[in-house]
């Protein structure tokens, strides 16, 4: 009532290359070998545990063992696939963090260069400030000199005006004296 030549195809994922899938064909001979191995193990366990009479496996028990074996293979493959996926995710995260670190290194270098530039500008401004103070002092002195000269020019202009008036008055006086003398 069971098919004599039945095989079961179970997909197996390689842990290193999980995207590539190979198939594992469980044939009746392998199942029989596995069942014999399982029988030997279970017989040893049974004899070790107690001295009961061993009974041959029924077709239902054989089917259950076969299903358990297939489930175990599937579970192992699933675990390998999950482990591979976790490794890939971890590698992606490492690459992303490495990229972020490189970006931060570039930003740090730019910031350092900008800081050096600002420091050089600050140093130049300090030097210019010193020379500016000297030049400002010179300009102030020259302005004071100009003011003094302007004041002196104004004074002298007033004196000249005064002298001109005096001269004119004297000239009129002289002219008047001449007129008196002529008369």
Image: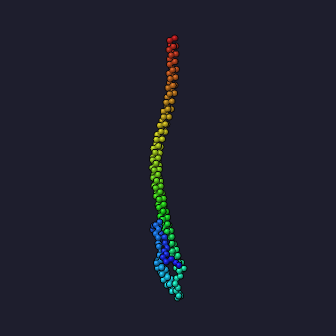
Spot the residue most to the top.
183
Report the residue at 53% width, 88% height from top.
Answer: 52
- 82, above or below 59, in the image: above
Report the residue at 45% width, 44% height from top.
Answer: 131
- 60, above or below 167, in the image: below
Q: Position of residue 151 (x, y in %)?
A: 50, 32
Report the residue at 47% width, 45% height from top.
Answer: 129
In front: 19, or 154? 19
Total numbered labels: 0
Spot the residue most to the front.
1
Instruction: Tell me the colour scheme of the image.
Output: rainbow
* Residue 51 in sight here: yes
In front: 159, or 54? 54
Q: Position of residue 107 (x, y in %)?
A: 47, 55
In front: 80, or 40? 40
In front: 152, or 40? 40
Spot the residue most to the right.
60
Q: Position of residue 173 (x, y in %)?
A: 52, 18
Q: Position of residue 141 (x, y in %)?
A: 48, 38
* Residue 76 in sight here: no
């Amino acid at each position: 009532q069971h098919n004599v030549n039945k095989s079961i195809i179970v997909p197996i994922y390689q842990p290193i290359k999980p995207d590539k899938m190979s198939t594992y064909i469980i044939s009746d001979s392998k199942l029989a070998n596995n069942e014999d191995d399982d029988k030997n193990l279970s017989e040893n366990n049974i004899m070790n545990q107690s001295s009961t009479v061993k009974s041959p496996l029924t077709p239902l028990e054989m089917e259950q063992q076969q299903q358990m074996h297939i489930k175990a293979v599937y579970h192992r493959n699933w675990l390998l696939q999950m482990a591979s996926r976790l490794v890939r995710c971890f590698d992606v995260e490492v690459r992303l963090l490495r990229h972020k670190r490189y970006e931060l290194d570039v930003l740090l270098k730019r910031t350092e260069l900008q800081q050096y530039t600002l420091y050089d500008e600050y140093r130049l401004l300090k030097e210019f400030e010193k020379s500016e103070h000297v030049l400002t002092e010179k300009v102030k002195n020259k302005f004071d000199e100009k003011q003094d000269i302007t004041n002196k020019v104004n004074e002298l202009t007033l004196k000249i005006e005064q002298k001109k008036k005096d001269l004119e008055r004297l000239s009129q006086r002289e002219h008047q004296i001449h007129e008196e003398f002529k008369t």
